[in-house]
Image (cartoon, grey):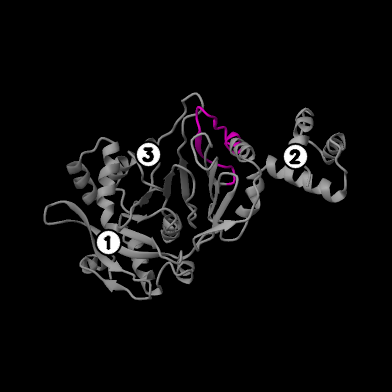
Amino acid sequence: MVDLDRLRPTLAGLGHAPTTADVAAAMREEGFVVTDALLYDAVERLQREATGAGVLEPLLRIPGVTDVLVNGADQVWIDRGGGLERVDLGLGSEEDVRRLALRLAARVGRRLDDSAPYVDARLPDGTRVHAVLGSVADPGTCISLRVPSRRRFTMADLVDRGTLVASAVPLFEGLIAHRLAFLVSGGTGSGKTTVLGTLLGLVPADERILVVEDSRELDPPHPHVVRLEGRPANAEGSGSLALATLVRQALRMRPDRVVVGEVRGAELCDLLAALNTGHEGGCGTVHANSAADVPARLEALAALGGLGRAATRAQALSALDAVVHLRRDAGGRRRIAQIGMFARDREDEMCVREALSFPGDGRLVRGPAAEEFLARIGR
């Protein structure tokens, strides 16, 4: 195998993208024997470095892969729906991994160096990249790639994948048809975005959906979707566009449904305000360990927007109807585990009462709020 580090100085001085002939000439200059196999390998590796995710690109193309994780130069992991799997892939040295991280950041115009040692961005193909340099990470530069879904899912697909029991499909159709405002909750990688996108596909075709996201992930199978995407500040510290600002803009664009891809900051206050002013059927995702934890999560997020507990409780209970909670079981399967309803408890605090639960064995178990939920969706 040709040592590319010996070729790079010569190729970098060409002033243009190296051709196959340029690579062959650089190999001869460095004393390598130029065979068809060695030349092809060198050109292919240089092309991988210059485009896409470099040496990681083949992993991103594996069917079903949702995440590619790099922990320094010696560890590469992938997730294709069944939990993390270690991959035998050589990345070279720590300097090679750092170079890859810097190039990925440069592709989207983001700064990554020892004074700004981390970056979170989206590549042109939709892949979300997060990188932390080895100066602050052990065992070295870490790169996390989140692969966007390459397909749009239907409710039948969710049933086939075991995410949803078939008997629950009419319940979710009713949830959308009767314009309940809801949040999809769950942990990282539990499938929140996939489920929300699928549910949005049930929205009538004559309705206009406004999607606000920090990084574009939602791609619902619907004919009338407008997307607004936030952006961080540039290297000079200007040009940022917060989700709270985009939610306010979305309300001026005649939406039938306002969707926040991931509620994780002050934008929650604007979303609650919107849902309290006639914008029914809004929805979003939120990180939470259980449906019962969602109220506390909302209170914490609303505090970032300057909203107190009492005001948050009043706004949320008026604006939100239901929670759809997802869980990832021990085998890695992502599934809808529970539907809950927002309510007040005996201490007048906000809570989520269980309406229906799905134990994972095909059953549908009714909870204390089942009658209320079924009445709200016309069942």
Q: CA distance from mark 1 to mark 3?
A: 31 Å
For numbered disc 1, what is the local secondary structure? Answer: strand
Q: Residue at x 53, y 29 (%)?
A: 114
| Viewer-side residue, 109 vs 268 | 109
| Viewer-side residue, 222 vs 31 | 31
Which label was assigned to residue 278?
Answer: none
Which label was assigned to residue 340?
Answer: 1
Density class for disc 2 (Cα within 10 Å; few <14, some 14-19, many ≥20) is some
Q: Quadrant of residue 87?
A: bottom right
Q: Residue at x 83, y 46 (%)?
A: 39
Image quarter where the C terminus lies is bottom left
Q: Which residue is mark 2?
A: 4
Q: CA distance from mark 3 to mark 2?
A: 54 Å
Residue 110 drawn at (x, y percent): 54, 32
Q: Which residue is mark 3?
A: 252
Density class for disc 3 (Cα within 10 Å; few <14, some 14-19, many ≥20) is few
Q: Is residue 345 visible?
A: yes
**What amino acid type is highlighted by mark number 3?**
Arg
Q: Earlier in the sequence, mark 1 or mark 3?
A: 3
**What amino acid type is highlighted by mark number 2?**
Leu
Left or right for 229, reference 93: left
Residue 75 drawn at (x, y percent): 57, 50
Q: CA distance from mark 2 to mark 1?
A: 56 Å
Q: Quadrant of residue 109?
A: top right
Rendered position, 274 above or below 333:
above
Circle nearer the viewer, 2 or 1: 2
Q: Is residue 276 visible?
A: no
**What amino acid type is highlighted by mark number 1?**
Gly
Circle nearer the viewer, 3 or 2: 2
- Magenta span: 104-125
Q: Quadrant of residue 77?
A: bottom right
